Image (spheres, helix red, strand yellow):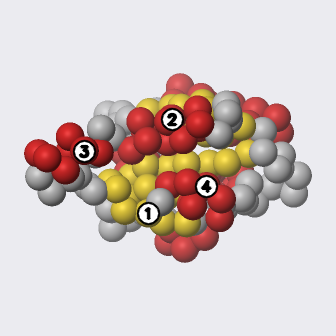
């Protein structure tokens, strides 16, 4: 469960939510943060014309990660598969010498062949799949 992943994760170990089409894992993380009384900051990553995150988005990610890594709190980066060029910086944040113990990084991504193996291997992974039926979908909401 997501709650078990949060308990197993640490400031240096991200939780990677592998998405299937039609899943909004962000809402699940937001709900968990609310229940655990954690501050959650989110950023949706998107594709620029060059095939990765643009300069403004890179700056926003750097600022968000730096502030949260020093002050604590949870960060949710949506759609990492659309900004693979930022994942090395994300990995570097987890490897900082000094990092706030209350920091927790959550990343959503669709499966992608070029997702950095080092981040994939060092993270706790959970598959977030769409419900198999309408009834299951209604039960989950």
Element type at mark 1: strand
Of callouts 4 and 2, the N-terminal one: 4
The image quarter containing residue 75 is top right
**Label 1, label 3: how far apart the Cα atoms are:** 20 Å
Q: Which residue is mark 4?
A: 6
Q: Position of residue 121 (x, y in %)?
A: 55, 73
Element type at mark 3: helix
Of callouts 2 and 1, the N-terminal one: 2
User: Which dot marks residue 15?
Assistant: none
The image quarter containing residue 132 is bottom left
What residue sits 37% from the left and 62% below the top?
127
Question: Going by the picture, which residue comes out furthest to the left?
Answer: 134
Q: Which residue is mark 1?
A: 126
What residue sits 60% from the left and 70% below the top?
122
What residue sits 11% from the left and 52% below the top?
133
**Label 2, label 1: how far apart the Cα atoms are:** 16 Å
Question: Going by the picture, which residue comes out furthest to the right?
Answer: 98
Q: Which residue is mark 2?
A: 30
Q: Position of residue 77 (x, y in %)?
A: 51, 41
What residue sits 43% from the left and 42% below the top?
28
Label 2 Cα neighbours within 10 Å, binned few <14 / some 14-19 / many ≥20: some
Report the side of 51 relative to 43 (left or right). Answer: left
Location of residue 118 with respect to 108 vertically, above or below: below
Nearer mark to the viewer, of 1 and 3? 3
Label 3 Cα neighbours within 10 Å, binned few <14 / some 14-19 / many ≥20: few
Location of residue 135 with respect to 16 vertically, above or below: above
């Amino acid at each position: 469960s997501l709650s078990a992943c949060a308990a197993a994760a640490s400031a240096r170990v991200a939780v990677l939510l592998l998405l299937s089409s039609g899943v909004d894992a962000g809402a699940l993380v937001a709900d968990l943060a609310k229940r655990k009384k954690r501050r959650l900051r989110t950023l949706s990553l998107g594709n620029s014309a060059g095939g990765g995150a643009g300069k403004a988005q890179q700056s926003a990610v750097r600022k968000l990660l730096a502030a949260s890594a020093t002050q604590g709190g949870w960060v949710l980066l949506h759609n990492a598969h659309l900004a693979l060029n930022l994942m090395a910086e994300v990995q570097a944040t987890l490897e900082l010498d000094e990092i706030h113990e209350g920091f927790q990084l959550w990343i959503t991504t669709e499966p992608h062949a070029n997702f950095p193996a080092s981040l994939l291997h060092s993270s706790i992974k959970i598959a977030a799949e769409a419900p198999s039926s309408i009834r299951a979908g209604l039960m989950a909401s």
